[in-house]
Amino acid sequence: MDNDLLYVDYAMPELSEPRLALFTLSEAHELLHVLHHFGAADHDWGAQARRFAAELAARVPSQEE
């Protein structure tokens, strides 16, 4: 398993408002797209991404609603 993705030098942006405790619907759909992208990979991380994508998709209303 390649752990390089866990140690990316990425600085979180400074927030002008407090962070919400939950994802917005838009953020949830963006995350779903990212998980689908990584889920296409054939390795352990891909399997985890597919599992989380399925869980998220089951809990988030579709964009058409």
Image (cartoon, helix red, strand yellow):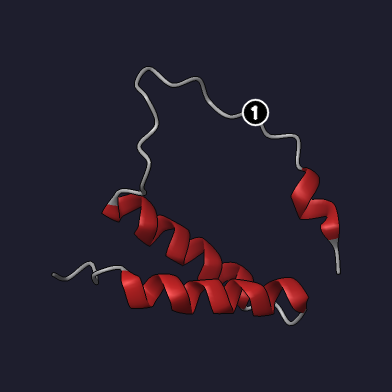
Give residue 46's quadrant in the image. Answer: bottom right
Which sits in the foreground, 46 or 22?
22
Which sits in the foreground, 29 or 20?
20
Above or below, comparing residue 32 to residue 57 in the picture: above
Please tell me which residue is depicted at 28% across the width and 55% down the height of the picture.
25
Relative image position of residue 32 (x, y in whole percent): 44, 65
Relative image position of residue 57 (x, y in whole percent): 38, 74
Q: Is residue 9 left or right of residue 27?
A: right
Above or below, comparing residue 3 to residue 21 in the picture: below
Relative image position of residue 6 (x, y in whole percent): 76, 50
Relative image position of residue 1 (x, y in whole percent): 86, 69
Please tell me which residue is depicted at 46% across the width and 58% down the height of the picture.
31
Q: In the displayed orientation, state which residue is furthest to the front.
A: 21
Please tell me which residue is depicted at 49% across the width and 73% down the height of the picture.
53
* Dot 1 alpha-carbon crowd within 10 angstroms: few under 14, some 14 to 19, many 20 or more: few
Please tell me which residue is depicted at 24% across the width and 72% down the height of the picture.
62
Q: Amino acid at mark 1?
A: Ala
Q: In the displayed orientation, state which residue is furthest to the left.
A: 65
For the C terminus, which image quadrant? bottom left
Q: Is residue 61 left or right of residue 30?
A: left
Q: Is residue 34 left or right of residue 38?
A: left
- Count the labels in the image: 1
Give residue 45's quadrant in the image. Answer: bottom right
Which sits in the foreground, 24 or 8?
24
**Which residue is denoted by mark 1 in the rendering?**
11
For numbered disc 1, what is the local secondary structure?
loop
